[in-house]
Image: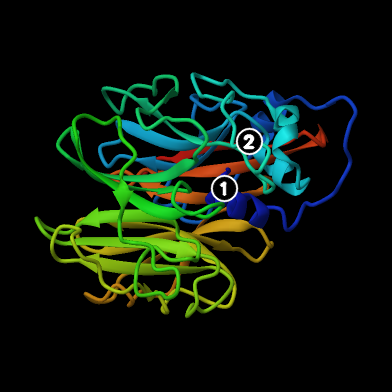
Amino acid sequence: MFHIFISFIIMMLLIVSCDSGGGGTTGTSWEKVKADAYVTVHLASEYNTPSKLPVSTLGWEDGINISRDGLHIYATYMPADLLSFTLNGDSVENYYKYDRGPHYDMDFITTPGPAITYLWYQSDIIIASRTSVSESFSGWTTSSMKRSIYSEGALSAVFSGSDIDICAFTSNENYTYQNNINVITGITGGDPSGTGTLITSIDTTGTSSINTGYIEDNPHIERLDGSTLVLFFDSEDRPGGEGGHDIWYSTSSNNGGDWTTPLSVTSINTSSKEHQPHLYHDGSYWWLYYSAYDGDGKLAIYRAKQNSASWDDWGTPELVISAGNTEGVGEPTLTANGDLYFVVIYKNPDGTEYDRYDADPWVALKK
């Protein structure tokens, strides 16, 4: 099984660059592609020139989340060109053709078996850490959530000191070829472990629950006080939204025991696509960072400031970072001091049909 979250993001980033052209020898190295890549900062008074994180590899690093203290970064990982795998509509039997990045200690021997007829590529959550923000991150390692077959990703962690208070993430274990949102609480340290529990039961016939028979993806969870939590997520097919992909929210007043019926963020959602929400508090106001199309047809990062106490009262969106000469940017996530981490998708113009795209985490440091 492979992650719907990854599937959607990469398909959206294709819109302006779906040319074919397979086989042959790569003439342009990935090192050159990445060295020549640039994105455009539209809030130059706030952010320094972005750069690729040194921890990046030729594997597919997506669905990133940075801890507020800046000491842990998480990513959804596959050691392959996942975008080409998706574009080609290939089968599980051929996934090895796209293999490219380091495998770490992931299990790619155990497979779902011949009965699986849909696109499948297992993902695991990887983590890189450091002891100070003045240092570089360590190399990636698989988190203690790692297991065979199932895909977990898009982890969002709330810390209490140096320990994870609660984390939300997506998993396709409970619904074939479908993401639902799970949570884990009370983790010692920054390495998440366990398989978690569904944040709500799966309501396959309606939309009163967070988890439904539709797609729930890209969760971002925040603790507001000792008993109050808020969850933002997105969905591409949940009824009641404004367009093809929308942002939703739900709250809990009893520490996650119960959650309100999710509501569409109507002040942000349009008939286009808004997704990958991330809440950030600057000490005075809440901001909603998210991904949406820019005028160039590529995904870009936007933000809006909260006008009132309502989670559906956001001001006029402003463009933060656009794609530049890359295929698109997304997955905004911020540290407490406002450093903005995000994902960049590249295309190698000389790539083969199995080796044409890559995704890496970047950072734009706050001035």
| Whole-number angstrom distance, CA of label 1 to CA of label 2 | 22 Å
Report which quarter residue 340 is drawn in. top left
- Percent position (x, y) of residue 232? 35, 62
User: Quick one: quadrant of the C terminus?
Assistant: top left
Whether residue 49 is visible here, answered yes or no, is: no
Residue type at mark 1 is Ile
Tell me where residue 44 appears, x and y as whole percent.
Answer: 47, 51
The mark nearer the N terminus, 1 or 2, is 1
The answer to which image quadrant residue 264 occupies is bottom left
Name the residue located 42 percent from the left edge and 47 percent from the top edge: 47
* Position of the N terminus by quadrant: top right
Asked whether residue 35 appears in the rendered view, the answer is yes
Residue named by callout 2:
113
Q: Residue at x 26, y 31 (%)?
A: 190
**Other residues around mark 2 within 10 Å, as few (<14) / some (14–19) / many (≥20):** few
Left or right: residue 267 compared with residue 78 = left
Q: What is the three-letter code of the residue carrying label 2? A: Gly
* SS of the residue under disc 2: loop
> Callout 1: few (<14), some (14-19), or many (20+) C-alpha neighbours within 10 Å?
many
Which label lies toward us, 1 or 2? 2
Residue found farthest to the front: 115
Coordinates of residue 284 in the picture (x, y in percent): 20, 61
Disc 1 and disc 2 in contact, CB within 8 angstroms: no
* Residue bearing mark 1: 6
Question: Quick one: 329 or 4, which is closer to the camera?
Answer: 4
Quick check: 100 left or right of 3? right
Q: Is residue 235 above or below residue 343?
A: below
Q: Residue 104: horizontal and vertical position, in percent? A: 51, 19
Q: Total number of numbered labels?
A: 2
Up-down relation of residue 261 to residue 51 (above or below)? below
Instruction: State left or right for residue 203 relative to residue 301.
Output: left
Determine the residue positioned at 48% across, 48% down.
172
